[in-house]
């Protein structure tokens, strides 16, 4: 049996199902944004794209952890 996914990536299946975009597309949007701070990016995803706080936070945390 494989290990269950933990951390921010555990949100990815529900993000794709709820918002209809693949995770790679969300990460591209985050990387293309002129914003660089975690909190700013989370607020932007919530206000401009309608994501919930937990989903936006997970996407930003995972993307920023990967670097640019």
Image (tube, rainbow, N blue to C red):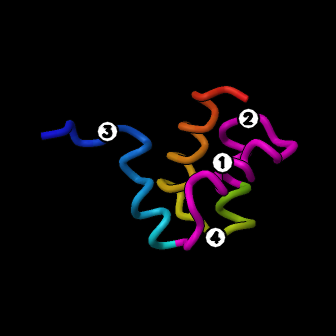
Q: Does the magenta stretch include residue 29?
A: yes
Check disc 3 and report its element: helix, strand or loop.
loop
Instruction: Point out residue 37 in the picture as x, y percentages from the top left corner.
Output: 73, 35
Magenta stretch bounds:
19-43
Of 22 and 30, the residue lying toward us: 22
Are the residues flagged by discs 2 and 3 in contact, CB closer than 8 Å? no
**Can you identify the residue that label 4 sits on?**
50
Sequence-earlier tag: 1 or 3: 3
Task: Identify the residue at horizontal 59%, vertical 67% (top origin).
Answer: 21
Which marked residue is nearer to the observer: mark 2 or mark 1? Answer: 1
Per the model, the C-alpha gap separating discs 1 and 3 is 18 Å
Instruction: Point out residue 29 in the picture as x, y percentages from the top left corner.
Output: 74, 53
- Quick one: quadrant of the N terminus? top left
Per the model, the C-alpha gap separating discs 4 and 2 is 19 Å
Task: Identify the residue at horizontal 47%, vertical 54% (top origin).
Answer: 54
Per the model, the C-alpha gap separating discs 3 and 4 is 24 Å
The answer to whether 25 appears left or right of 22 in the picture is right
Q: Which residue lies furthest to the left in this view?
A: 1
**Can you identify the residue that label 1 sits on?**
27
**Can you identify the residue that label 2 sits on?**
37
Sequence-earlier tag: 3 or 4: 3
Which marked residue is nearer to the observer: mark 3 or mark 4? Answer: 3
Sequence-earlier tag: 4 or 2: 2
Sequence-earlier tag: 4 or 1: 1
**Can you identify the residue that label 3 sits on?**
6
Label 2: few (<14), some (14–19) or many (≥20) C-alpha neighbours in 10 Å: few
Check disc 1 and report its element: helix, strand or loop.
helix
Are the residues flagged by discs 4 and 2 in contact, CB closer than 8 Å? no
Per the model, the C-alpha gap separating discs 2 and 1 is 14 Å
Sequence-earlier tag: 2 or 1: 1
């Amino acid at each position: 049996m494989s290990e269950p996914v933990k951390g921010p990536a555990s949100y990815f299946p529900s993000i794709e199902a709820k918002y209809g975009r693949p995770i790679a597309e969300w990460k591209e949007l985050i990387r293309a944004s002129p914003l660089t701070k975690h909190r700013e990016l989370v607020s932007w995803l919530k206000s401009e794209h309608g994501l919930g706080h937990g989903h936006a936070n997970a996407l930003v945390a995972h993307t920023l952890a990967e670097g640019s």
